[in-house]
Amino acid sequence: MEKTKIIMDVDTGIDDAIAICLALGSGAFDVLGITTTFGNRKVDVTTKNTLKILELIGKTNIPVSKGAAKPIVKEYFSPEKSIVHGADGLGDMENPLPEPTIKETGMSAVEFMAKTLAESDEPVTIVPVGPMTNVATLLMTSPELKPKIKEVVVMGGSMLKGNASPVAEANIKQDPEAAYILLHSGVKIRMACLDATWNGYVSFDELEDWKTDNKLSRIFYQMCGIYSEHYKLRMKNPGLAMHDSMTLAWIARPELVKSEDYYVTVDIDGRYTYGMTVTDVNRVTGEKPNVTMSTDVDRVPFINMIKEAIARLSSEMK
Ligand code: BDR
Ligand code: CA
């Protein structure tokens, strides 16, 4: 199978950490690099978390470049503790992952993306699973590189309910202007939105197996304590949503994700709806579709892909 060349853009985060493992353990991707952004925590923390995960799974050759510390227009507010990902962004485990010994490239995320695209002999897929600030900045500063972007497969948005406001999804709400720039850039976009990602869950029973499956799943089991509580108590979901992983599963196995092409924009003015993705489901605007929106996922094979990637990485771990 030919591997898809990707750059991941992450705000690591528990589900980001799992998505990194899916990218590197599935065998479906050539991960050219990982760039980081503020989001689930401050960018220094999400960058460190990314390095910690790569070191844990022994993929220390993947270049990591630090990106945006704040949104394009607004300020960034980081609460002392994320109610979803903990204070350290990786679930505040009793035995936290050690400080990383590997370092970032020293290039900024946008510099890394631009250089990688410019040097690649084939178009590259960008996979943002946090606020879209880095990719929006790239599109503004290097528009000539658009033809080198095969597509952007992003985790964000929703057609119905939000998770960061009644109507806004977290990655978009953190930087609505960036999402707006991306959506109206003319590049090919697939959006793994909440309407499908909430259905892509590891059930609470299935999570119990992670305790004993293998060494890496055991670490994720411990990491998922707060995350699991959030989905059980606050979101009332049947399990832990694997939001960020859905982007990768959709690329590797498109048949797992149902989708529709729609015209989608983002509210960047609204008092109550700031950051809401507005989807023209009834096709009343006359605008041409600009986004392929996920509408559902085949949950069991999707979760099995994640489990298999974790098992594979675990068997290679020292
Ligand atoms: C998104 O928000 C973050 O908390 C997750 O990592 C995911 O990218 C879900 O709305
Ligand atoms: Ca994320």
Image (cartoon, helix red, strand yellow):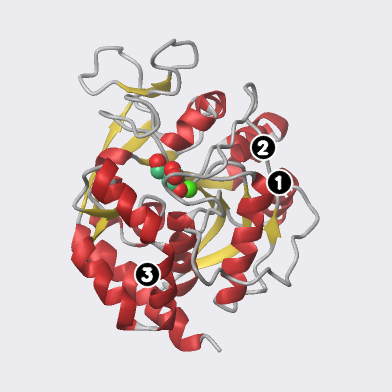
Quadrant location of the C terminus in the rendered image: bottom right
Q: Residue 114 got which mark? A: 1
Amino acid at the residue labelled 1: Ala
Task: Residue under label 3, please give it.
Answer: 221
**Where, quadrant-wise, is the N terminus in this rendering?**
bottom left
Q: Is residue 27 visible?
A: no
SS of the residue at dot 1?
A: helix
Q: Nearer the viewer, residue 101 or 73?
A: 101
Q: How crowded is the residue under tag 1: few (<14 C-alpha within 10 Å), some, or many (20+)? A: many
Q: Residue 221, image x and y in percent?
A: 37, 69
The residue shown at (47%, 29%) is: 173
Pick the front one: 298 or 126 = 298
Q: Position of residue 137 (x, y in %)?
A: 66, 33
How many residues crowd mark 3 within 10 Å: few (<14), some (14–19), many (20+)?
Answer: some
How far apart, in angstroms, are the residues tagged by discs 2 and 1? 7 Å
Tags 2 and 1 touching, CB below 8 Å? yes
Total marks placed = 3
